[in-house]
Image: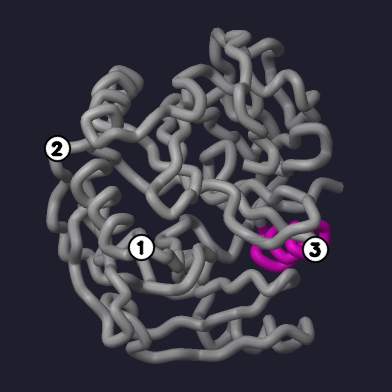
Amino acid sequence: MTKPFDPKVFRLGYIALECADLERTRDHYVETLGMTEMARGHDGEVYLSLGADHHNIVLRPAAQKALVHQGYQLKPHHTVAEVARDVQALGLKATIKTDSQPGVAELVEVEAPGGVMFQLFNEIAMPCPGWKETGASILRLGHLAVISAEAEKLFQFYTDFLGFAYTDDIAGVARFITCNRDHHVVNVVGLPDNRVHHIAFELKASAFHVSACDALRRAGVDQLWGPARHTAGHNIAGYHYDPNKVMIEFYTEMDVFVPELGIQEPRPWHEINPLKPRSWPLENMNAWGAPFEFNFVTG
C-alpha cells in the first residue's frame, strides 16, 4: 500500500546563509533580486523579505559561506512542542526557541543527519512590505538543494519524519522531494560534502526571465546556464552565482505534483503523459539540448 501523503510541513519559509562579504551579498539580494531589508540582528545578520513574510532570506556575517539553517512552516495541527518530542524520540537533538529571531515567536531547531539544521515553526509575521518592480522582481522562495555526505539518512528524515514525497531523481545522485504540490521543495544531492548546492526563486512569469537576465547584466553578473527547460521538474531555469558564490536559480513553469494520482499534472511538453516519478540520466537534465558549461552536480 502506498504511504499516504501527509507531510508535517507545507512550505519552505526561509533560508539562512553565512557569507564572507555581507554587505555586497545583501546588495545583490536587495538591489539586483528585488528583496526588502526588514531588520538587522544583534550579531549583524540581515533579514530580507520577498514581499509578504517578515523574512525569506537571512544573511549572517562569517569567515566563509555556509548554510546555517532552513525554516519550514508546520501544518496547524502539528505544534512545536509535539514535533520536538517526536524528534527527540528519534534520538536527534531538538531545541525549542522563543523570540530567537524577529517575526518568529516560537520554533523548534533540529539537527538532522549530516549536521543539517532545520527550524520548524507554526507562524511567521507577515508585514507585507510589497514586491518590488526593480531588479529581477522575484515572486517567492521555491526550493533548496542540499549536498550531503549522509544523503540517505537526510533523505529519510525528510520523507519518513517530515513526510515529504519523492517525485524524481537524476542518476540516483540528486533526489527531488516535495511537501506540497510543487514538483520539488528540496533536492538532496549525495556527494562527499556538506553544503548548499543552490537556492531557487520563482519569477512572476516566464517572460520575466528576460528582465531578470537584464538585471543581472546591469549588475555585472554573468549567467552560468540557461534559461532553458529542465527535464526533472520541467521548469524553465537560469542560474547565476551570488557574491558569496552560492548558486541562485530563477525558474518558472515548475511541474505540479498530484499526490492523489502519484503523477505530475499533465503538460504538453512532457515526454510521457501521465508522467510518474522517474530517474533521469545525468546527461539528460535539459529538454532543449543546451550544453552545460559548468559542473552542475558539484556546482
x and y percentages locating residue 104 in the rendered image: 33, 78
> Three-letter amino acid code at disc 2?
Thr
- Asked if residue 153 lies in the magenta stretch, the reply is yes
Identity of the residue furthest to the right in this view: 1
**Front residue of this view, candidates 2 and 136:** 136
173 vs 170: above or below? below
Give the residue pinned by disc 3: 150
Indicate which disc, 1 or 2, sits on the residue closer to the N terminus.
1
Q: Residue at x 32, y 65 (%)?
A: 22
Indicate which disc, 2 or 3, sits on the residue closer to the N terminus.
2
Find numbered disc 2 in the image and state the secondary structure of the residue it sits on.
loop
> Three-letter amino acid code at disc 3?
Glu
Give the residue pinned by disc 1: 21
Give the residue pinned by disc 2: 134
Eye-nearest disc, 1 or 3: 1
> Three-letter amino acid code at disc 1?
Asp
Which quarter of the picture shows residue 102? bottom left
**Front residue of this view, candidates 183 and 5:** 183
107 sits to left or right of 114: left
Which quarter of the picture shows residue 91? bottom right
